[in-house]
Image (cartoon, helix red, strand yellow):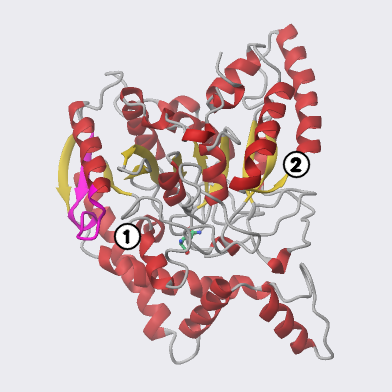
Amino acid sequence: MSELTDLTLSECISGLQGGDFSSLELVRAYLQRIERLDNSLHAYLCVLAEQALAQAKDADRRLSSWRKEQEAPPPLMGVPLAVKDVLCVEGAPTTCGSRILENFTPPFTATAVERLQKAGAIVLGKTNTDEFAMGSSTENSAYGLTRNPWDPQRVPGGSSGGSAAAVAARLAPAALGTDTGGSVRQPASFCGVTGLKPTYGSVSRYGLVAFGSSLDVVGVLAHDARDAALVFQHMAGRDPLDATSVERNLTPSDLTRAPFPEREGELRGLRIGVPREYFIPGLQAEVEQAVRAALALFESLGAELVEVNLPHTEYALPVYYLVAPAEASANLARFDGIRYGPRLPADELWQVYRRTRGQKFGPEVKRRIMLGTYALSAGYYDAYYGQAQKVRTLIRQDFERAFQQVDVIAAPVTPNTAFVIGEHSDDPLSMYLEDIFTIPANLAGIPGLAFPVGFDQQGLPVGMQLMGPHFREDLLLGAAGVYQQATDWHRRTPPDGRSG
Ligand code: GLN
């Protein structure tokens, strides 16, 4: 048998339920591997070893009593998961990669995490992130960068870079991330794992530290589409504590079956839109080649490729970089040195705010607060924020029109594979350009799924994304599932990440 840490989440579940190994053995295997590899990788900001071991023992007791009584255990019983450090877990530090929350321990757990725990999952630890999820490389974390398991000189992407690196390096079988402008899909692509950004509103954000409230969604990083579906299914749905959340009655078979199940392993009848605007000059040649090869395979599996237009794509980046900072500037006003985290004392209240915020926020966060405050200020609101909202509607309508013609849309995830650490650090605009293909789905609120479709000449993973109409994660997961049955890109492991 391979190492326990090589198993997918679904394999972990069947092994645990079948009694092939215990939850304690599984959690120990991950903790040992984290101990061995994470000093250099730095995927985790904190590892919850003691709690995880105690919960694993408890899960084993419950699993064995269930086995005796021949009853089905809760679906994720005894399975470890990693959680991005922007989601609250009761009693565990939640820093958002920021000094302004360096001593903050939330007294409650985010609904998304709590639902997974109710289904039996165990939180292994909190993963590294760009400060307040602002970034595309995890270099903006105040606690040091995370390295890409495929090449330690390169970034894992961001902002959910810790989660993506943890899954790629087998330091967790799956992990939660968040996606405001691409933060699940882009790191998934850079690290060669599968990343699901669900439809806006599908997963409660209660207990998620807010960045851009009209864009934020909790997503999953996993080894394959099937595992992503499993985690998504158990955390999705209406939560009275998040007014934007909607009811989703999802069953595992809804999400993992092929879109047209009467022909198992085939995609006949699936119309895949290929938007001209996503195959642009500047796209790394090997990325284009790998994505085109994947499209050809989809075609050979029965899908029909249809050229579509998304004419307002070029405005997505400027729209996002008005809307997201505007919302962030309002959301981050709560970090004032009074209510959360450290306080730098001063004689006057305004000086407390100024000193604490001035010293404890990092440069990218300050840049966004300033941009956002400016875009929302009297006299400029209509010209910037108001205008951006109008163009956002045009971008959403582009997708609505395209989805009258096709079932899903396929595109690259990023213009290039993982870049070298420091490459974009001095030039925020060049960093923002990394998000050019992921941001439109957030502006439209539609689901997106990134999954590996090849490697470039340097051995770095290339990702492709499928986008679908609102609430049609099933189409994306089903189609990627069929692709993953026919390929093994998603099974490749980073060179020194091999344990078996
Ligand atoms: N990279 C984008 C940004 O910096 C997206 C971040 C995200 O999705 N959280 O805003």
Magenta includes 448?
Answer: no
Horizontal relation, residue 356 to residue 368: left or right: right
Q: Nearer the viewer, residue 440 or 146?
A: 146
Q: Say which residue label 2 marks.
A: 48
Vertical placement of residue 262 versus 159, above or below: above
Q: Say which residue label 1 marks.
A: 396
Amino acid at circle 1: Arg
Residue drawn where x is 27% and y is 45% of the image: 410
Q: Quadrant of the C terminus?
A: top right
Determine whether label 2 and label 1 are within 8 Å by CB.
Answer: no
Amino acid at circle 2: Leu
Vertical placement of residue 25 versus 94, above or below: above
Residue drawn where x is 41% and y is 57% of the image: 442
**Mark 2–mark 1 distance (CA, rounded to whole Å):** 41 Å
In x, y percent, where is residue 22? 71, 18
- The residue stretch that appears in magenta: 270-285
Query: Secondary structure beneath disc 1?
Result: helix
Vertical placement of residue 417 versus 79, above or below: below
In x, y percent, where is residue 474? 39, 35
Q: Is mark 2 within 8 Å of ligand 1?
A: no
- Figure label count: 2
Q: Quadrant of the N terminus?
A: top right
Magenta includes 276?
Answer: yes
Going from N to C along the chain, the mark reached first, 2 or 1, is: 2
